[in-house]
Amino acid sequence: MRGGEKVLEALCDIFPTADIYTHVFDPRAISDKLKAHRIQTTFIGSMPYAKKLYKRYLPLMPMALEQIDLAAYDLVISSESGPAKGIIPTSPAMHVCYCHSPMRYIWNMYNRYYESSGLMTRLMMPPMAHYLRTWDVATANRVDEFVANSTTVAHRIRSYYRREASVINPPVDTGAFRPVHASELGDYYLMVGELVSYKRPDLAVEAFNRLKAKLVVIGGGEMLDHLKKIAGPTVTILGSQPFDSLKHHYARCKALIFPGEEDFGIVPVEAMASGRPVIAYGRGGATETVVANKTGVFFQNQTVEELIDAVQRMEKLDFNPTDAVSRAADFRREVFINRFRTFIERATGTELAASA
């Protein structure tokens, strides 16, 4: 239940009788709201160890998507940061793609994924990525309307697909977070997210090792063990945490550290909803949510020195928690639902049922 699934939940609120198609379905891992819908998987869901190793089946996903029978539908919405838009709707059905990002591992982050991969993966990546890029560009023509989750992603869609996209930011459950009184604030900075290379958790750990200041890291992922090894005495690696612990740390941190480039980035919005400022890398979605020198500060290069400088500037910022909470409210769930509903009604020329 990450950002993509939260978007899917909101779409289910707009379309309460919609069917859901996916490659892999694990009922233990998703919400009751999603399980209330009719869910069908492609043949990949029947492949060995698909629930754990679904990424290994990426080369088969184009074929699997093209086998989905969508003849019964007037409207098809694909929600993707992978190849989901490659489905084939039956004319004259409308196909709207809500794009979290064109596939990062074959487009804007290809070199980073390649460099961090093992030998066998590096041998396979160039021909596979070439095949997937060709297919990905071709299938952009199967989409009637693109909706991007940020202006950053809309630029990628224009660059890679030569298509224009409307921008509707994803829903954030801002109401789940609350600021605390100043007397309850802690003396630590916080990093939250999946611990993978492109999010640069190593940069945060190295900076706070050098600062000898307190940093708490929440999240699991392939870099967890490495970060534990390099963490100094002032850095605490908690790993994955329950939601109550996450909320507690958000509300009491001095500031959130966000050192990676994200398509949109829900984490900074959650931190601001908790009344806390954000120190973010000045590229990607964070530049569209964090207000410079009001709800946070940016650093322009992913170096330890620049992150340290940003932390020091944050210490001097005249920060008002009310400004952060107000900014976060711009991305609340109701805003997404209203904007997406209006977009669909305009695109289809059909007013959606009031019960939706």
Image (cartoon, grey):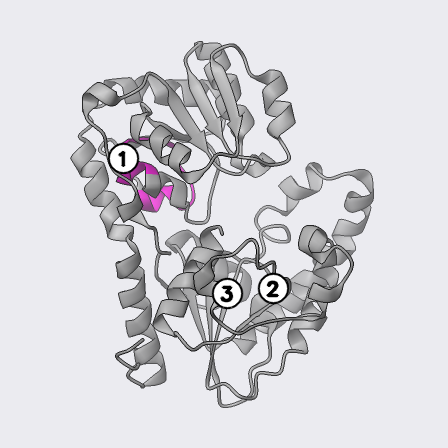
Residue neighbourhood size for the residue with mark 1, other residues' Cα within 10 Å, grouped as few (<14), some (14–19), many (≥20)? some
Instruction: Reply yes or no: does residue 321 show up in magenta.
Output: no
Q: Is residue 55 visible?
A: no
- Mark 3 or 2, nearer chain start: 3
Q: Image height check: is 86 above or below 180?
A: below
Q: Measuring from the top left, give residue 232's x and y in whole percent.
A: 54, 12
Residue identifier under label 1: 292
In this view, the mark in front (1 or 3): 3
Can you identify the residue that label 3 sits on? 35
- Identity, as a three-letter code, of the amino acid under mark 2: Pro
Residue at 23 percent of width and 48 percent of height: 329
* Residue 272 inside the magenta-drawn segment: yes
Q: State the CA–CA distance, disc 2 to disc 1.
A: 34 Å
User: Circle 2: is it few (<14), some (14-19), or many (20+) Cα within 10 Å?
Assistant: some
Question: Which quadrant would the C terminus be assigned to in this image?
Answer: bottom left
Image: magenta residue range: 271-289
For the point 53% across and 88% down, the residue is 72
Residue 17 falls left or right of residue 52: left
User: Quick one: label 2 or label 1, which is nearer the N terminus?
Assistant: 2
Residue 311: image location, x then y, percent: 36, 20
Residue 312, percent across and down? 33, 17
Upstream in the sequence, badge 1 or badge 3? 3
In the displayed structure, 105 sits above or below 79; it is above
Point out residue 279 in the picture as x, y percentages from the top left corner.
36, 29
Q: Amino acid at mark 3?
A: Lys
What amino acid type should be assigned to the residue bearing mark 1?
A: Ala
Q: Label 2 belongs to which residue?
A: 83
Element on which disc 2 rests = loop
Asked if residue 122 lies left or right of residue 356, the reply is right
User: Which residue is more in the foreground, 179 or 145?
Assistant: 179
The local secondary structure at tag 3 comes to helix
